[in-house]
Image: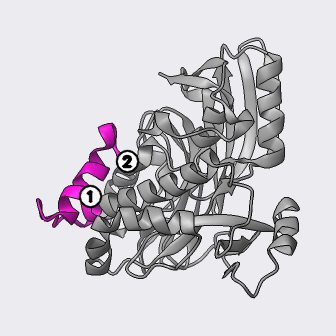
Amino acid sequence: MLEQLPYLTLKTPPKSTALLKQQCADFVVKEDLGYEMSGEGEFVALKVRKTACNTLFVGEKLAKFAGVSERNMGYAGLKDRQAITEQWFCLQMPGQETPDFSQFILEGVEILEVTRHHRKIRTGSLQGNHFEILLRDAQETDELKARLNFVANFGFPNYFMEQRFGRDCHNLTQALRWAQGEIKVKDRKKRSFYLSAARSEIFNLVAAARIEQNLAQQVLLNDIVQLKGSHSWFKADESEDLNALQVRLNQQDILLTAPLIGEENLVASAIENDIVEQHNAFSPLMKQEKMKAARRPLLMQAQDFQWQFVEEGLKLSFYLPAGSYATALIRELVNYKEA
């Protein structure tokens, strides 16, 4: 499914190949919460570096060591397992001493900092992630250098990637079965996964359609555009000067968006409306689950994007806001194979 998504860069699939995550050190992620710990409060906050470890597994082990329920453990986001990642966990321990985590031993886990915070670190409550990635065996070619420059200047499609859909798109398949009344889903986590997969699929389809029609960088009537650096948006309707908005888009002052559908969806550009309507099988599910519609930038630009060809391949470093996938950027550069 994801293989069929069109490419923005040079309008063609990449010619270069590379190996991804052959070693954990090839994929380094450092979480940016966007705020500092307060140093006091009922939550013990731990900054952890983990290697080849699952986020949930580490969180469960930390909770068990501290003698608290897994329900009272929090983190901002799931991080890649086949990687070296740094992220924060929290444990709710009101009126209790901070445990001596120097005694905590788990292979692949190093505790970098222990402090306190006054509120829970909730899923999604992060600003972004810093990435340092080695694409092994990538060769320095004119085509790959052209792709790097294009991505640096124009960004990449903000597609949702494999992690969102589950193995063999299981989450999307289950979402459709749920919407059609074939199954009932009682588990709260599964409900969340399935709803996210359905919304992500429609976002990807809208983004793909615009890229295929060379409309990913053009303001259309009734587009929903977002002010860069904020979550504020407005509609490019008849009251707006589309030519002036196009200038602002070219200057990257505003961003085009695509939908994360909900119980009530905005009337937007014709191309978006058609795709949302074609997938209205999900509408009753969105109403039933009271999902709030949202917007997501159609394209994403990596911040502090740098690259260097080395003996082992191509080194990349960049920063992405929360919710954007490093692999969506990488697929614009090379055909990669994961370990």
Mark 1: few/some/many CA within 10 Å (<14, 14-19, 20+): many
Can residue 88 be seen here? The reply is yes
Q: Alpha-carbon neighbours of circle 2 within 10 Å: few (<14), some, or many (≥20)?
A: many
Q: Is residue 184 magenta?
A: yes
Residue at mark 1: 175
Task: Assess whether residue 5 is covered by the magenta stretch.
Answer: no
Task: Give the structural element (helix, strand or loop) at label 2.
Answer: helix
Q: Say whether residue 144 is left or right of residue 80.
A: right
Q: Secondary structure at mark 1?
A: helix
Compare residues 132 and 145 and report the one nearer the observer. Answer: 145
Q: Going 66% across and 30% down the picture, which residue do you hit?
A: 12
Residue at mark 2: 165
Q: Which residues are magenta?
A: 166-191
The tag earlier along the polypeptide, 2 or 1, is 2
Amino acid at the residue labelled 1: Ala
**Residue 104 visible in rendering:** no
Which residue corresponds to the image point at 55% horizontal and 49% vertical from the top-left? 208
Q: Which three-letter amino acid code belongs to the residue tagged 2? A: Phe
> Could you say which quadrant of the image residue 125 lies in?
bottom right
Q: For this rendering, which residue is in front, 149 or 222?
A: 222
> 37 above or below 333?
below
Where is residue 155 drawn, in percent x and y? 74, 47
**Residue displayed at 42% across by 40% down:** 105
